[in-house]
Image: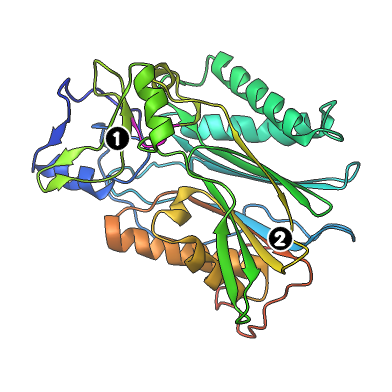
Amino acid sequence: MSSPKAASTSTSPRVTNDAKTEIGQARRRLSVLSEKLAEGVDSVNLDESPPEEAAPDASSGFIVNSYGGYSKKGYAPYNPKKKNQDALIMAEDPKTRSLFFCVMDGHGEDGDKVSQGIKAKFANYLFKHRDFATDIKSALAEVIDKCEKEILRESSIETDFSGTTFTCAVIRNNKCTLANIGDSRTSLGFRNAAGGVTAIGLTDDHKPDLPAEKARIEAKGGRVFAVEYDDGVDGPARVWLGHMDVPGLAMSRSLGDVVAHSAGVSSEPDFVEYEFNPDREDLILVMASDGLWEFMSNQEVMDIAYNTTEPRFAVDRLISESNERWMREEQVIDDTTVCVAFLGNFQSSSINPPASSSAPEGK
């Protein structure tokens, strides 16, 4: 995705039915709107999923028995040089016996630099933070703030119209501390009375049309509305400046995004402290960018993960399914990052792992 440009100064911008409209409508669900187009068509292979990074299970005593993850570049026919703007962190801190998972979804001209810049530093900063052993929430808040400030000071990264989501989890003993900024998401699956899996969201997506988010944006002079196409209002609600139709950000919280923040977008994380339930059997944790969640519900995701034998196979199946849905619905594919953890003693009863020779690795 490229950096957004001003379209007009009307209250609700219309996109006319020309060649650009066809491309624009094919990406109306992406995080940032832009009129900047690149020529050329790139091929897409939905089955190509070589492992980017994966990790073995942690030492005994963790609620997580195994995990795996992968970040896959999307597909945009108007941008053959497209980069993967997502980032994935899976790290272990033996000193505090903690697991750290994090997913970021960059957007804008330098979204990849924002997400990768934070990825390069975050786990190291967090594990060395003075409060990490005793106050995870405080440590997360300070490290998030520190990383964002460092990115904003980096002259080689354009942050006026570039930024990233941020969702993470620190798992220690039977407790999980989550921080969320934007519309990446973490969900949980537990065993239900019928012997299957029931999904719940652990984090809430920060969308501009949520009442509290919209009120904050409007109080700062920003506006919230969806783009109106020839066939009517379509796509998600977006954040705009009060006097100009930029940046068109489809989330109400993010890191970076200086212009959007002047219109009320926030970098303040929501925190959730979850204790893996002793009264029921928590089975699966899934953390992903909205490349997964755009066309798949929490329950659909958990149903797929539940019927795989290992986290790496779950990751492979989820990315393949979400990519196919993107192509059917939008003719583009958003970058998709998925991390799956199996909890407790869970191991699916499925005996048929996916027939993919390039599934993300894990253990």
Relative to 281, residue 5 above or below: above
Relative to 286, residue 97 above or below: above
Amino acid type, callout 2: Tyr
Q: Quadrant of residue 126?
A: top right
Q: Taking the image as drawn, is residue 48 in sight?
A: no
Q: Write the residue at 33% across / 52% down.
A: 42
Q: Secondary structure at mark 1?
A: loop
Q: Is 195 displayed left or right of 185 in the figure?
A: right
Write down the region rendered in magenta: 248-252
Q: Secondary structure at mark 2?
A: strand
Give residue 67's mark: 2
Amino acid type, callout 1: Leu
Q: Write the residue at 56% across / 34% down.
A: 115
Tell me if mark 2 has few (under 14), some (14-19) or many (20+) residues whose alpha carbon lies within 10 angstroms of its own: many
Q: Taking the image as drawn, is residue 127 in sight?
A: yes
* Magenta-span inclusion, residue 250: yes
Residue assigned mark 1? 33
Task: Answer with mark 2 or mark 1, whichever residue precedes in sequence.
Answer: 1
Q: Is 39 displayed left or right of 318 in the figure?
A: left
Q: Write the residue at 79% across / 72% down.
A: 345
* Magenta-span inclusion, residue 124: no
User: Residue 159, how many percent across, how many down?
Assistant: 47, 21
User: Residue 261, how many percent across, how many down?
Assistant: 44, 20
